Image: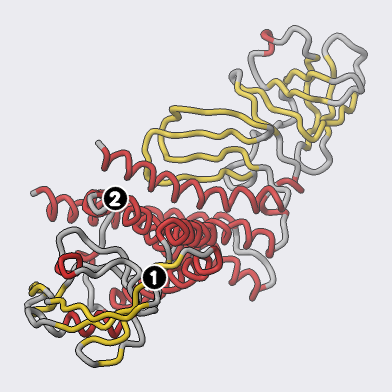
Amino acid sequence: MSTVIAFIVIFGALVFFHELGHLIFAKRAGILCREFAIGFGPKIFSHKKNETIYTIRLLPIGGFVRMAWEDPEMVEIKPGHRIGLILDQVGQITKIILNNKEKFPNARVIEVESADIEHELKIVGYVDGEDDHLQTFSIAREAVLVEDGIETQIAPFDRQFASKTLGQRTMAIFAGPFFNFVLAFIVFVIIAFLQGVPSSEPILGKITDDGTAIKAGLKEGDIVHSIDGTEITSWTDVVEMIRKNPNKELEFSIERNGKTQDISVTPESTEVDGEKIGLIGVYSPVEKSPLKAISYGFKETYFWTKEIFLMLGKLVTGEFSIDALSGPVGIYKSTDTVAKSGIYYLMKWAGILSINLGIMNLLPIPALDGGRLMFFAVEALRGKPIDRQKEGMVHFIGFALLMLLMLVVTWNDIQRFFL
């Protein structure tokens, strides 16, 4: 159960931050965001704040921000349609009733002559029971369409995704993966702030209860000047001397409380990858500093970004096969293994997964953020956008292929771990 909770929390946080990036920059650009969703499928929770519905859906395999224009916008109000209008005190339309008008006795029913709910924001028509002449009604920018009892806010053209500049649209899409890198950085900084940053100084860190170091009398904070007469200038020198001398007594010259003393320690022999190495049961020293924690966050984010790109390169060159990929099942299994090592390892795993999600979404694959950014790049070169229907078809095909890949990877994971 603890693994299930850890998996849900980690995956939920990754998706939440990714979609939060989209939401923040879309709203900054003035785009109407209809829904902020974690998961897919049926809604299990929803809450509307201002003009956005925040939902949690049944299948925890992703999320989305539904922006105005991305889906088919509004039903077209054609000439001859009979609709109901609810007006405010100044005579502007606040609700457009498309059906079930009898449920709104205060609505003014009109036969539409023309309607424009995106640009001119007006409806022209004949009002039932009044003089047989055309009347024009202006539409409030926050007006809603009501169909089958469900209200949907209209989206004037300047609130739609397509109306924004190329730079604004690019940032709204790029912000999702970017926020995954931000999340990873924050996680690494928190780890460093709580646990400390590894130091290169030749100072002993935490001493284990069952190693030869504590038996010999070494203590946390001892400064190592030399081992067996060899001068020690860094923690790396300490580690190398211990690893190279399993079962050999070593003379440590250390400084404690300003006084120098010699202590004999014999590293225990341990086999790692077929090689015998020495261990004495001591951890590297750590420093707790806000500045060093921030520096550590940048270094870890850069390191794992580079490592994941190198792995992708090997996948492209054929050094890794598709069988090496993992889907949700594989990630769940790895989370189970990491969780047994402690909270800090689990946090680091979350940071690595966040970077991985950010990079995967930036790949120029249709249906992913990188695919959309690729179309924006083409638009910048052409000076005009790709036809919306053609772009939509490419993304649909890309999504179908991604789902097929997901099925293959998931089946491989199930075979690898459970069959």
Asked which quadrant contains residue 219, the reply is: bottom left
- Residue drawn at x 20%, y 78% as measured from the top left: 263
- Residue 367 in view, yes or no: no
**Would residue 214 be found to the left or right of residue 235 on screen?**
left
Badge 2 crowding class, 10 Å Cα cut-off, few under 14, some 14 to 19, many 20 or more, is: some
Instruction: Find disc 2 in the rendering and name its residue.
Output: 328
Q: x and y percent of residue 347 in the render?
A: 37, 54
What residue sits 75% from the left and 42% below the top? 156
Q: Say left or right for 63 vs 157.
A: left
Judge the density around disc 1: few (<14), some (14-19), many (≥20) Cα neighbours within 10 Å: some
- Residue shown at 66% from the left, 51% from the top: 161
Depth order, front residue of 370/145: 370
Residue 341: percent from the left, percent from the top?
24, 54
Q: Of the residues shown, which amino acid type is indicated by label 1?
A: Pro
Q: Earlier in the sequence, mark 2 or mark 1?
A: 1
Q: Position of residue 59 (x, y in %)?
A: 36, 38
Q: Amino acid at mark 2?
A: Pro
Q: Is residue 133 toward the left or the right of residue 268 in the image? A: right
Q: Which residue is mark 1?
A: 198
